[in-house]
Image (tube, rainbow, N blue to C red):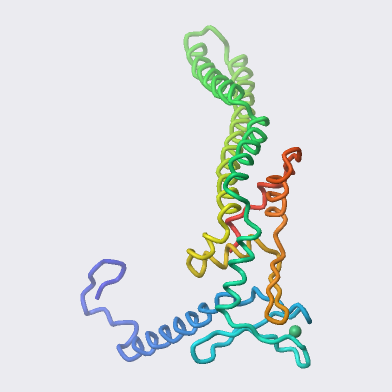
């Protein structure tokens, strides 16, 4: 019997009998199977009926998956998943920004980010951290060789440690800025290739992309309408109007985190 990679002798009574084990295994497969079929509905929970605002549910019928509104009396018809998919791809292609626009926009957004933290400031903070750390080290020597007494040692130590903590906080804020640069890149990458990312993504990635790029996807009589997410609207506006300044919160719409 192997428990956590260690071999135990058979004298230990097995906690689960073979029959029990088989039953558990069976239930597990059934669960996975159920989970899997549910997962196959690509647009599960993402579609609303434009007529009555309820969520449209998917169902498999023979070869196809259909999404329909279950409100009685609602005039909305159902829509087939593959047709829905085509419309969404076309819709995403319409929203996305062009590669040319991206080049310009990247330049502008980068200078916008760097305006907040110039490189000189970054290196100056690093130097001051090194300096304060060295001073802190020297203090002990000064105490040991009797240059300063215990009281002034304690005071200078406290002050230097405080200075160091402040500098490190400043450094941390600047590394946050670096992270926003990575966010900026993924934001731009996504904005210029929504359709490509959607059509080549896994089921999960495609769902994540839709949730990030839209606030609602509604269907009326077989026509799909994608309500664009605010961050994406802003990126599109920025790409068309070079005079606009990005809003502070643009990168906070942590775009790839919503799944
Ligand atoms: Zn409806």
**Residue nearest the viewer, comparing 69 with 5:** 69
Q: How many marks?
A: 0
* Residue 155 picture quarter: top right
Looking at the image, which residue is at 69% across and 47% down? 250
258 left or right of 237?
A: left
* Residue 128 picture quarter: top right
Looking at the image, which residue is at 60% across and 60% down? 93
Looking at the image, which residue is at 63% across and 51% down? 97
* Residue 220 picture quarter: bottom right
User: Where does the N terminus fall, quadrant-wise?
Assistant: bottom left
Up/down of 19 relative to 104, above or below = below
29 left or right of 259?
A: left
Q: Position of residue 140 (x, y in %)?
A: 50, 17
Up/down of 219 relative to 248, above or below = below
Looking at the image, which residue is at 77% across and 88% down? 74
Up/down of 165 relative to 136, above or below = below
């Amino acid at each position: 019997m192997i428990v956590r990679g260690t071999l135990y002798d058979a004298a230990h009574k097995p906690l689960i009998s073979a029959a029990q084990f088989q039953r558990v295994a069976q239930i597990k497969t059934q669960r996975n199977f159920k989970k899997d079929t549910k997962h196959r509905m690509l647009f599960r929970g993402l579609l609303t009926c434009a007529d009555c605002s309820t969520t449209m549910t998917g169902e498999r019928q023979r070869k196809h998956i259909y999404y329909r509104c279950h409100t009685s009396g609602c005039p909305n018809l159902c829509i087939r998943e593959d047709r829905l998919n085509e419309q969404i791809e076309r819709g995403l292609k319409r929203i996305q920004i062009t590669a040319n626009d991206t080049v310009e926009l990247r330049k502008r957004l980068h200078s916008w980010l760097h305006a907040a933290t110039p490189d000189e400031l970054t290196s100056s903070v690093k130097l001051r951290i090194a300096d304060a750390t060295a001073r802190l080290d020297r203090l002990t020597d000064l105490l040991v060789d009797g240059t300063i007494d215990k009281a002034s040692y304690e005071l200078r130590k406290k002050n230097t440690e405080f200075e160091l903590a402040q500098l490190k906080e400043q450094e941390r804020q600047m590394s946050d800025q670096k992270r926003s640069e990575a966010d900026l890149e993924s934001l731009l990458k996504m904005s210029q290739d929504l359709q490509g990312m959607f059509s080549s993504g896994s089921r999960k990635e495609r769902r994540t992309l839709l949730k990030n790029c839209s606030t609602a996807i509604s269907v009326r009589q077989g026509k799909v309408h994608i309500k664009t997410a605010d961050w994406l609207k802003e990126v599109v506006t920025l790409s068309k109007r070079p005079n606009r300044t990005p809003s502070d919160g643009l990168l906070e719409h942590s775009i790839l985190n919503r799944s």
